Every structure is written in structure tokens, then in C-alpha cells.
Amino acid sequence: YEDNKKASNKSGNEHGRPAQATPETKIIQEDKGKGALASIQRFRQKCGAFVNSQVISIFIIILILVNSVMMGLATFPFVTESSSVYFAFEIIDLIFLIVFTIEIVLQLIFLGPALFQDGWLVFDFAIVAFSWGFFDAPSRDPNAGGGGSVKIFRAFRIFRALRLVTRIESLRDLVTALLGVMPRMAAIAVLLLIIFYIFAVMFTDLFGDLYRKGLTEEDYFSRLDLSLFTQFGMMTLDWAGVAREIMNIQECKEEFKDCDCATEEEKCKKTFTWAWIPIITFVMISSFIVFNLVIAVICDAVAVLHDEEEAEEAAENDVDPAMLRKKVRVLKNQVNELTNSQTQMLDSIEFLTRQFKMAELSKRSKKSSFE
């Protein structure tokens, strides 16, 4: 029977039909598949251990810093006016980009699709992809490429410096805190927008015709959009020049235009000496009150983040923060009691020392009187 089965399988193979797989063959194939998957998994783990090691992380941070500094130096004349130096800077920048690309590829190999579930790694991936998307081949001519758009894309390479945020934990925590308070920041932004709109309409109504009459050198408030732009400068505390220019405006009376019957002060008078009142009111509300609200919200977010870190550390150590604070209070009380006891003991020792000295003096005085 076995000979006939083998002959049948052999004849089937000769006629082009596949031979039947035996159980042993299936087991071998499954073992090979498992071995291949295990090898791939080991390779991914090695990639992850390598790219996430502390040495590589520090090395990448140094590269980001050096690359940022070099992109700043590339704007100086000694680089832009020398084709060889400029070409060297371009080559070094390309090397940096290749290293960053290798890093993100290793992260992709290690994490796979899970990489896109980590916001910081997605940010790194987007920066590197953006750099390659607008990549321009190294050239010896700083003006090569012809268009202004190429220069704009080159200028945006400096955004690689933002990758420091993903590498330094304190910066990540700060950005996380800022993202956590975005709803409250949005409420403050709406409040600021309402304040801007109210004062923009007010300034346009009050001072909208000054530039048309030739009373101001700059067009500050003739339209609503120009008023908003001027207010933005005021919000940054650059308001004194605008206020002084409007307050110094003099309007002359028509009846004294060609008459010598009045002095210059009587002919022309300052009509907007009160302009500082709405301007300073806007500056105080926008710059001091609103921005103090923003700072308060950010400080509150940082404090909350700090409390969360303490809670996480306590959870890792299986320590209840409330219980820990209670133990600290108990220890403080015990230390105070020990301090009081020590003070009382020192007082007792001093008292006994004085008594001993008095006894010695009394004994000596009696001895001398006896003699």
C-alpha cells in the first residue's frame, strides 16, 4: 500500500499535479514561518533599543542643536558670498537630514503603525517629511532655484529646531500644559477679540478722518482693519507715538485763516488732547488685565502638571500623598518634642552646674573660716 501511495504521488508530480503535503511538512513550514516572524520581531526590538537608547537620544539632540546653529550661520555674508562655503553648508545640511530620516525610519520599523498614535513622533515624522517634500539639491549658488518660493521653502528648514521639544522632557511637559489649557485660552482669546472690536469701532469713529484731512502722517484709524492693526501695536505697548501724534494735532479756525487779528494759539488749538483717555484704557485692559489672565492660566496649568507628576511618582512608589503628608506632620511634631526635651535637659544641666558651683564655694568659705 505504501509503495502504491508513493508511486501515485510520484506519477501525480510527473503529470504536473502537486503532491499531497504530509503532517511533517506542515509542521516544518509552520516552524519556518514562526522563525521568520521571531527574527523580524527581534530585528524590530533591536532597532527600538538602538534608536531609543540614551546615547542616541543625546546624539540626536546635539545634531539638532548643531543643525540649527549652522542654519543661522548660513545667513551671514561669509557663507552667502562664498560659493564653496555655501556648498559645504548645503552638503552638511543634507547629511543632517539623512541622519534624521534614518532615525525616524528606525522608529517606524520598531513601532510600525503605532508610531502614528504618538503625537510627538508624528510631529517628528511631519518635520522630516516636510523637509524632504521641499528638498532642493545642494547648489553653489545661494540664489539657485530662481524663485522666491524656493527661498521660502529653504527658510522653513529652521523648523527642524522644533524637534528639540520632542526630545527634552521639560519642554514636552510645558507644551503639554499649554495644550491642556487651550479651552480656557480660547475663552480669553474670545474676550480679547470682543475688546478689540469694541475699541476698533470706537477709534474709527473718533479718529477715522484724521489721515484724510492730512492731520496725521500715518493712516491709523480710517478703516476698521487699520484700527485693528494699530490696536495690535498698542497691545505690545507701542502706543505712545500714536497717542502723542493725535494729541498734538492742531485744527485752525477758518475765520482766522487769512487774518492777522489773532495770535497763533487763538487761530489753531489742539482739539484731541483727550485722546490719551481711550488709548490708555485700551492698553490697560488688553496688555495688563488680559495678559495677566493668560499668565495665570499658564501658571495654573504648570502647577497642575507638577501635581500630576508628584501623584505619578507616589503611585509608582505605592505611597498615598495624603498619608505621606500626615507622616511628615507627625515627624515634625516628634522633632519639636525632642527639641523641647533637649532644651529642658540643658536647662537642668545648667541648674545642677550652678548648684554644684555654689556648694563648692560654700565649702571653701567654711574651710577658710575654720582655719
Image: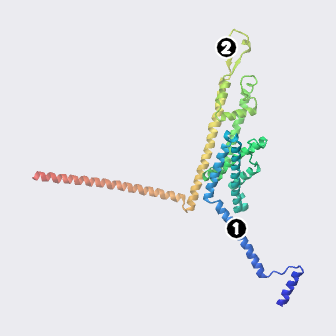
Amino acid type assigned to the residue bearing label 2 in the image: Glu
Residue closest to the eye, 318 or 46: 46
Q: Locate the N terminus and report the quarter of the image it occupies.
A: bottom right
Secondary element type, mark 1 = helix
Q: How many marks?
A: 2
Q: How is the image coloured?
A: rainbow
Residue closest to the eye, 371 or 20: 20
Residue closest to the eye, 90 or 289: 90
Secondary element type, mark 2 = helix
Residue at image position (70%, 44%) is 84
Residue 352 position within the rendered picture, expressed as x and y whole percent measured from the top left: 26, 55
Residue 227 position within the rendered picture, expressed as x and y whole percent measured from the top left: 72, 32
Comes first in the chain, label 1 or label 2: 1
As drawn, 353 above or below 84: below
Residue 264 disc label:
2
Amino acid type assigned to the residue bearing label 1 in the image: Gln
Q: Is residue 172 visible?
A: no
Residue at image position (54%, 60%) is 320
- In three-dimensional space, the C-alpha distance between marks 1 and 2, rounded to whole angstroms, equals 92 Å
Residue at image position (39%, 56%) is 337
Q: Is residue 49 visible?
A: yes
Q: Left of 112 or right of it: where is 328? A: left
Residue at image position (70%, 41%) is 80
Residue 269 position within the rendered picture, expressed as x and y whole percent measured from the top left: 67, 18
Q: Residues within 10 Å of mark 1 (few under 14, many from 20)?
A: some
Residue farthest along the top direction in this orientation: 261
Q: Are marks 1 and 2 in contact (CB under 8 Å)?
A: no
Of marks 1 and 2, the one in the foreground: 1
Residue farthest along the right direction in this orientation: 15
Residue 50 position within the rendered picture, expressed as x and y whole percent measured from the top left: 65, 61
Q: Which residue is mark 1?
A: 41
